[in-house]
Image: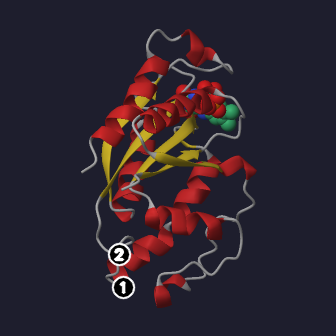
C-alpha cells in the first residue's frame, strides 16, 4: 500500500532555512517509498479562522478558500512533516493561520466525537529554526504543535530544532542539519506500521 506523506512549508521565505530542511526530509520520505504531497502555505490564499463556528454543526470549515484543497489531504495522510521558522517566540503567521483553520478537526474530535481519520493514528515531525540563542524559543511553538498534532490524531514522532540560524541559507553551514533532516524523513516512514 502506498504511504501518503504530507509536507507543509510554513515560512514566507522561499528557499529559506526551514525550506532547505524540509526539502531534505521530503527526499528522505520519498527515498523510503512514500508518496509526498508538498504544500507551500505562502503560495496559498487563505483566511485565518473567522470564528464562524459553522464547524460545530458538521465538523467542516465554512470558509471557501485554498484550505478546501488541504483538508482532504490532512484526512487522508499517513504522516506529516511540518516546518516553521520561529517568529516572536511563536510559529510563523502562515503556520498559525493554518493551525487555527484546523479548529474544525478539534470540533470534530471533541464536540462531535468524529475524529479526523476515523480514529486512525498517524505520525508526524516538526522542524523549526530560530535566529537567536534563546533557550525558550521553541517552548511556545512546541505546545502549539503538540495540540495541533493531537487534533490531527498524529503522534509527534520527532522534532528537529535549530538555534542561531538566521540569514537565508545559514542552515547550509550547519555540520549535521541537512543530513539529520534527510534521516528524519527516512525514519518517519520506516516507523509507520
Ligand atoms: C518577524 C520575525 C520574527 C522573528 N522572531 C524570532 C524570535 O523570536 N526568535 C528567534 O530566535 N528568531 C526570530 N526570527 C529569526 C528567524 O527565526 C530566522 O531568521 C529563521 O532562520 C528564518 O527561517 P526561514 O529562512 O525558514 O524563514 C525572526 C524573524 C522574523 C522575520
The CA span between labels 2 and 1 is 6 Å
- In this view, 131 is above or below 73: above
Which of these two is toward me, 189 or 114?
Answer: 189
- In this view, 48 is above or below 87: below
Which of these two is toward me, 170 or 21?
Answer: 21
**Which residue was labeled with disc 1?**
112
**Which residue was labeled with disc 2?**
109
- Label 2 CB-ligand 1 distance < 8 A: no
Which of these two is toward me, 35 or 119?
Answer: 35
Q: Residue furthest front?
A: 1
What label does residue 14 carry, if any? none
Residue 101 seen in render: no
For the point 45% across and 26% down, the residue is 182
The quarter of the picture showing ligand 1:
top right
Answer with left or right where residue 160 lies relative to residue 8.
Answer: left
Determine whether label 2 and label 1 are within 8 Å by CB: yes
Residue 51: % across, % down: 59, 76
Quadrant for residue 10, please give it. Answer: top right
Residue 149: % across, % down: 38, 55
Residue 68: % across, % down: 63, 71
Q: Residue furthest bottom?
A: 57
Which of these two is toward me, 65 or 29?
Answer: 29
- In this view, 77 is above or below 36: below
Amino acid at each position: 500500500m502506498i504511504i501518503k506523506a504530507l509536507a507543509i512549508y510554513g515560512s514566507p521565505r522561499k528557499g529559506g532555512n526551514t525550506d532547505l530542511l524540509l526539502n531534505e526530509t521530503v527526499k528522505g520520505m520519498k527515498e523510503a517509498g512514500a508518496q509526498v504531497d508538498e504544500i507551500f502555505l505562502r503560495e496559498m490564499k487563505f483566511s485565518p479562522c473567522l470564528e464562524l463556528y459553522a464547524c460545530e454543526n458538521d465538523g467542516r470549515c465554512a470558509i471557501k478558500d485554498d484550505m478546501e484543497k488541504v483538508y482532504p489531504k490532512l484526512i487522508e495522510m499517513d504522516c506529516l512533516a511540518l516546518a516553521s521558522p520561529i517568529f516572536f517566540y511563536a510559529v510563523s503567521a502562515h503556520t498559525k493561520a493554518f493551525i487555527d483553520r484546523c479548529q474544525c478537526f478539534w470540533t470534530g474530535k471533541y464536540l462531535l466525537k468524529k475524529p479526523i481519520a476515523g480514529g486512525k493514528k498517524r505520525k508526524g515531525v516538526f522542524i523549526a529554526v530560530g535566529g537567536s540563542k534563546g533557550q525558550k524559543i521553541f517552548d511556545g511553538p512546541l505546545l502549539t504543535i503538540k495540540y495541533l498534532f493531537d487534533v490531527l490524531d498524529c503522534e509527534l514522532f520527532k522534532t528537529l530544532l535549530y538555534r542561531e540560524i538566521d540569514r537565508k541559507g545559514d542552515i547550509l553551514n550547519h555540520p549535521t542539519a541537512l543530513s539529520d533532516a534527510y534521516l528524519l524523513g527516512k525514519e518517519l516512514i520506516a516507523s509507520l506500521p
